[in-house]
Amino acid sequence: MRFQNTGKNFTIMHNVDIRNVSLGQIQYFVKAAEYGNITKASEYFNLSQPTLSKKLKSLEAQLDLQLFVRGSKNIQLTPAGRYLYEKWENSVKQLEEDIQYAHVLQQGKTKSIVIAILDSFRPKAFLLPFMEIFSSKHPDIFLRIESDSAQDIRRMLIHGETDVIFSIYYDFDRRDLDQISWHLMGQTCHCACMRKTNPLAKKKYISAGDLKCADFVSISPQYLPEYTQMIENLCRPFGFAPNITSYVSSANSLTLNLQTDRDVFICDKYYADLNKEEHVLVPIENTGSGFVIAWRKDSPKEYLQIFLDEALSMIEE
């Protein structure tokens, strides 16, 4: 290290050998900072939590900086960590986009659209058939799909990491997003998912009032408060609050927690993780659900409008 004369103070300048800091370490740091949670970041990279923690501590040691303040569940950026995150976030994103576009060029295509879908959404219901038709009509446009939770694909869209997303209606119904446009597609009713041994399972349809004695499995408000609000809104007109007995971190975990004949969770016909041998979806009358297509208003890709127009046209047919 060396001393620099600033006129009034002496600042210690650290000589960091940047060659020992890998791009992978920077990606781990940026994603951990985004999530604010080591567990979720490690799931994103398909790493164990101890492995990712070790990599982040190694980066801190190499930089001689404390980047995070670690709590029992979440992590927070230090001032130094916040500074590096703000500097590195766009750089990592741009590098990833550059590499993806290089692959597009290698395939002989000149344009690309990144699509993100809800990880509990059944893609064969609409998206995959549409993509096949679209690709045959526009061979110069490369389509890439990502899949994640509702809150994460919304964040990806806001941050410009994806061009368009397909998500659940209740995540957009009451949300004000200045730079985002969206359109409701695939309108349908809500359904109650339950074990086939549930007494309500034999009905062709039910009222939300029939769920007054049910035990609800819900996505935790910590991850997606809109889901809990949706359940409460279903039950409120019938004079009761839902008896939520179990919280999970994602929609993919809902079916795993249908453990008794009283357990139910709310979804719609586009839900993907249904075990048809054990579970059944019972429509709830006088309710509304569906999925939305959402995109950024300021997208620089003029050809994205072609994708949007054809997607909307196909679903309306």
Image (tube, rainbow, N blue to C red):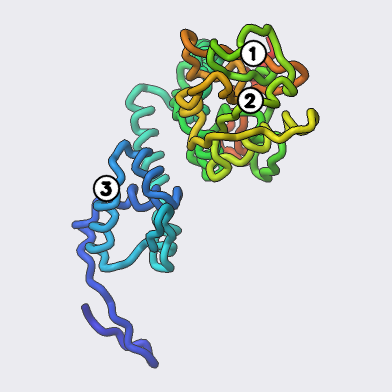
The mark lying in front, picked from 1 and 3, is 1
Asked where in the image residue 107 lies, by quadrant, the reply is: top left
Q: Amino acid at mark 1?
A: Leu
Q: Kindly tell me whether residue 113 is visible in this rendering.
A: no
Q: Is residue 83 above or below residue 52?
A: below
Spatial CA span between label 1 and label 3: 44 Å
Q: Quadrant of the N terminus?
A: bottom left
Tell me the tag on residue 50: 3
Image spot of residue 92 (x, y percent): 38, 48
Q: Quadrant of the C terminus?
A: top right
Residue 52 point in image, percent of width and height: 29, 47
Q: Is residue 235 above or below residue 139?
A: below
Of the residues shown, which amino acid type is indicated by label 2?
Answer: Ala
For the point 60% across and 15% down, the residue is 269
Say which element carries label 3. helix
Q: Is residue 77 visible?
A: yes
**Which disc, if any, is residue 71?**
none
